[in-house]
Structure formats: C-alpha cells, structure tokens
Amino acid sequence: MNVLAIESSCDETSAAVVSDGRVVRSNIVASQVDLHARYGGVVPEVASRQHLAQVLPVIREALDTAGCTLADIDAVAGTRGPGLAGALLVGYSAAKAIAFGRDLPFLGTNHLEGHIYANWLGEGDEPRFPALCLVVSGGHTDLVLMRGHGEYERLGGTRDDAAGEAFDKVGRLLGLPFPGGPAVAREADALAASGAKPALELPRAWLHGTFDFSFSGLKTAALHAVRSGKYTTGDVAAAFQESVVDILAGKTSRLARELGAAEVLVAGGVAANRRLREELARRCPVPVRIPIPRLCTDNAAMIGAAATHRLRLGERSPWDEDIFSTNSWEVPLPSAGDRERR
C-alpha cells in the first residue's frame, strides 16, 4: 500500500510517500523557520499563507523523489488536527481534493497519533504492546498507554505549558535565536562539553500522586534567575534542561514499571533532545524506542505510517469530515470502528 500523506499542522509544509506503513520512499519538509524568526514565534496567518504557496510544489517533489505518480498511489492521508486551524485547512483540503479527484481512499489523521507512529518507520522489529507513549512536543506533553493499534488511554499530561513550549519561552528569555528549544539545548550541551556544571539548580514540580506535568513554575524560576544577573546563559539553559529531563524521564520510567509495559515509545519534537534520550534509556526498565531526530519533528511520513494502520482496519474519512484545531485529547483519538467502513 502506497500512501501519499500531507502534514501542515503548524509551520512545516510536508508531503511523503510511505509504503506499507514502514518504508519512507520520500519525505519532503519545507520549513518556515526563517520566515517566523523575525517575530520570535509562529504567526498563524503568515504560516497559512506560506502553506498555500508551498503545498503543491512539496507534493510534486515528494512524488518525484519517490519515483512515482498519482497513478501509483493507493490512498491519501492528511493531518486533521490538532494544530493551527488555517494551516491545517491547507494541507487537509489538498489531500482531500487529490483523493476525491483520483477516487482514492482518504483518511484524516490525528497529528499526535502520527508522532507515535514515527516509531514504526524504518527497518527492524515493530514496537510491541502494551507500549507506554511519551508524547512531548511544542504543544503537547502526554503519557498515553497504547494497548494496540487504535487503542489509547491517556494517563497523564501537562496542566499548563507543554515541555517544548517551555523550552521555547526560556530560549526567548535568554535572548537565544528562534526556535528557542534547540538553542537552549545547544547552550546546555556546550556547558556540559566544557566539563562545567550549572551554577544553579531549578525546581521540579513532581505533582506527587499523579502522572501529570507542570512547567509554568519552572519557567518562572528561570525568569528570576535571568533577572538576577548572577548566572550565565549556559547555567540557566543547563539547569532548565536538567529539570525538564528529570521530570519527564522520572515519571515515564516509574509508570512503565508500574504498568509492566513492553516498551516505551517517545514521540514529538522534544524527543530529539540528547539529554532526554540518554536519561530515558538509562532509567526505563524496558526498551526505549525513539525515532531518528528528523522524524521526531513534524513531517508527513509519520502521518502516512499512522494512516496505513487505520486504512488496513477498513477505516475511511467521510468527505464532510472537517479539521479539529483543539487539543486532541479533548477530541478523543478515534478507536477502530469509530469511522465509517466501506
């Protein structure tokens, strides 16, 4: 099964051709980082207009790179949400139009489910169930038990900022370039490479008795550290990163142990963070699976992988199905059979 997938939930326009849910034949990503850098963050209207300009060239490039045409495509998938409404509409509408025009099966796909399914891309054995999924990105921080394809239970999540959002905001506090998250990690890694340790320690909000997260207090503590003038950029960046990593790795490893999970699957842009990858591998009592860095950030290949498994279950999206831009856990991930079968 060759799936043409399109992703446009935020500021990357991406198209991919994925075979059998595992083989990436192409995965083209047109980034808007330079466009939004002048504003210090993603501007939704600007992102939507740029998606309009890029979506068709990106789709053509994905097909050309895969060495195929639309005649070789068996189904089409588009990110349905969560994300920026205007941005979502561009990619989702393009995917639906191609499917309708070619009379192909179409599936609107959950963005976070796509992040999880990035762990299916590539060679080797497939992930084993039950799997504990740590979804950690710019907009989401969640712990989800995945019992099987399409079977999810949310066990914890952030009560305020997502981890990636907190990274970006601390980057802005430190005057680092956009996007702030990777810049904070680079500063922290540079301090570690020098052999020095942070000159301060920032608090951890453990929220004992739950598997929820909170990063707003940590962000405020970083603000006070910056304003004090006592610490270098590297000190604050490293202390902040260590606090976030400690909380994420600590809660994930404890829950994996309590649940008897077969594996831990990590998903989302923050999964590319080196310290988080190290600490999860060190602390977790079961194997930890993390996609290669370029598949952690937003891309269409992960959408194609997730869509393939639902298409195999016989699911199809009705033509009148619309996007959703709210948090995906407020609009629950569909379980097998929720959509029409045909």
Image (cartoon, rainbow, N blue to C red):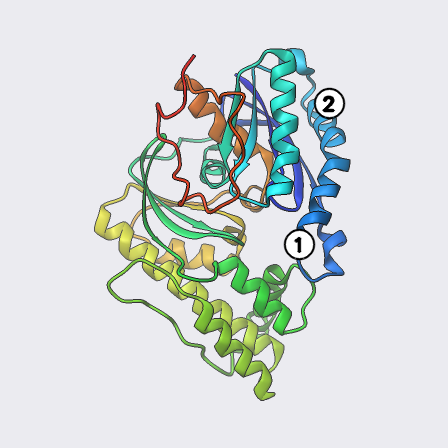
Q: How far across and down, in percent of the image, does residue 138 sit?
A: 54, 54
Q: How far across and down, in percent of the image, does residue 329 sit?
A: 40, 45
Q: Amino acid at mark 2?
A: Asp
Q: State which tag comes first along the sequence, 1 or 2.
A: 1
Which residue position is annotated with label 1?
42
Q: Residue furthest front?
A: 320
SS label for mark 1:
loop
Q: Is residue 195 visible?
A: no
Mark 1 nearby-residue class (10 Å; few <14, some 14–19, many ≥20): some
Q: How far across and down, in percent of the image, does residue 201 sit?
A: 45, 79
Which residue position is annotated with label 2?
64
Q: Amino acid at mark 1?
A: Val
Location of residue 248 with respect to 312 vertically, above or below = below
- How far is disc 1 from disc 2 in space, using C-alphas? 29 Å
**290 relative to 72 in the view: left or right:** left
Mark 2 nearby-residue class (10 Å; few <14, some 14–19, many ≥20): few
